[in-house]
Image: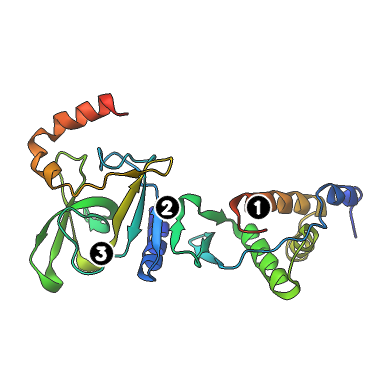
């Protein structure tokens, strides 16, 4: 069931934009956190290391899986996956997904 | 993220033949590395490191703790498998650290300022000889360069 108002939020966030994870980034679990390491490059810059919490790591796996299977993913794909896996309201899930995608886009790990 | 978690990951990547860039913290490598501002690029330690190399190493402190330092190799005691590597921070007036070959993680190949410009990678030998007057040189550095 979609909570009232969700549709509007989703539209605002341009969920239909197709995105792709960039090849060569590997998700590594270090202690309780995760990092994305660009292992395809020769020089790995720890100054720009992307750290992820457990939820963000889950989203990354989901984004990667979608990219591998369908060639791309959308924010709503990730939102659906998040709501399936965690007990979270769709609006909250969408806000988190959107913030995460902005961070990834800035970091250059998705396109 | 804590050093104890990040540095083993750096070690893994260095062993896989990658270069690693990071910004060290602290003042112990002044005047050559300004902690929190300058970045260093590391490569794995292949072959025998030379006196004057700046090395990332896991060392034992006086109270038997293990910590990671990025300090200059000032001396090698013994040879072969049992050699001990003695490190000292350029900005330190006293105190040395010791480790064995397996605890040497990486070697600095480049020092960069915050805007990405290369800094002079001195071999530090002259600086080592200047130890008796380091105190004053560091004082001048703090007052004029920072």
- The structure residue drawn at horizontal position 77% and vertical position 57%, both measured from the top left corner, is A75
> Does residue A96 appear to the left or right of B66 in the view shown?
right
Structural crowding at the residue carrying mark 3, measured as other residues with C-alpha within 10 Å and reported as few (<14), some (14–19) or many (≥20): some
Residue B134 placement: quadrant: top left
Looking at the rendered structure, the secondary structure element under dot 3 is helix
> Does residue B102 appear to the left or right of A74 in the view shown?
left
Query: Residue A36, image x and y in percent?
Result: 54, 61
Query: Residue A32, image x and y in percent?
Result: 52, 59
Q: Could you say which is closer to the camera, residue B134 or residue B64?
A: B134
The residues bearing labels 1 and 2 have C-alpha atoms spaced at a distance of 25 Å
- The structure residue drawn at horizontal position 42% and vertical position 40%, both measured from the top left corner, is B114
Of the 4 image quadrants, the one containing the C terminus of chain A is bottom right
Q: Is residue B17 above or below residue B23?
A: below
- The structure residue drawn at horizontal position 81% and vertical position 55%, both measured from the top left corner, is A15
Of the 4 image quadrants, the one containing the N terminus of chain A is bottom right
Nearest-to-viewer mark from 1 and 2:
1
> Does residue A60 appear to the left or right of B7 in the view shown?
right
The answer to whether marks 3 and 1 sit on the same chain is: no
The residues bearing labels 3 and 1 have C-alpha atoms spaced at a distance of 37 Å
Residue A105 numbered mark, or none? 1
Label 2 sits on residue:
B2
Looking at the rendered structure, the secondary structure element under dot 2 is loop
Residue B103 numbered mark, or none? 3
């Amino acid at each position: 069931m979609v909570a009232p108002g969700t549709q509007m939020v989703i539209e605002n966030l341009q969920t239909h934009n197709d995105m792709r994870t960039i090849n060569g980034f590997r998700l590594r679990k270090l202690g309780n956190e995760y990092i994305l390491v660009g292992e395809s490059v020769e020089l790995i810059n720890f100054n720009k290391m992307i750290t992820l919490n457990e939820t963000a790591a889950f989203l990354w796996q989901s984004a990667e899986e979608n990219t591998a299977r369908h060639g791309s993913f959308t924010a709503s794909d990730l939102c659906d996956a998040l709501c399936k896996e965690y007990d979270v309201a769709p609006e909250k899930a969408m806000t988190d997904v959107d913030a995460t995608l902005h961070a990834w886009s800035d970091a250059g790990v998705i396109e | 993220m804590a050093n104890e978690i990040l540095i083993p990951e750096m070690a893994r990547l260095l062993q896989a033949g990658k270069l690693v860039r990071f910004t060290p913290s602290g003042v112990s490598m002044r005047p050559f590395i300004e902690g929190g501002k300058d970045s260093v690029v590391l490569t794995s330690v292949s072959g025998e490191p030379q006196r004057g190399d700046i090395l990332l190493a896991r060392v034992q402190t006086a109270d038997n703790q293990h910590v990671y330092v990025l300090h200059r190799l000032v001396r090698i005691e013994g040879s072969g498998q049992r050699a001990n590597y003695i490190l000292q921070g350029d900005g330190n007036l006293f105190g040395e650290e010791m480790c064995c070959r397996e605890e040497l993680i990486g070697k600095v190949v480049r020092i960069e300022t915050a805007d990405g410009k290369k800094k002079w990678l001195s071999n530090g030998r002259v600086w080592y000889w200047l130890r008796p007057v380091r105190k004053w040189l560091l004082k001048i550095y703090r007052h004029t360069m920072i």
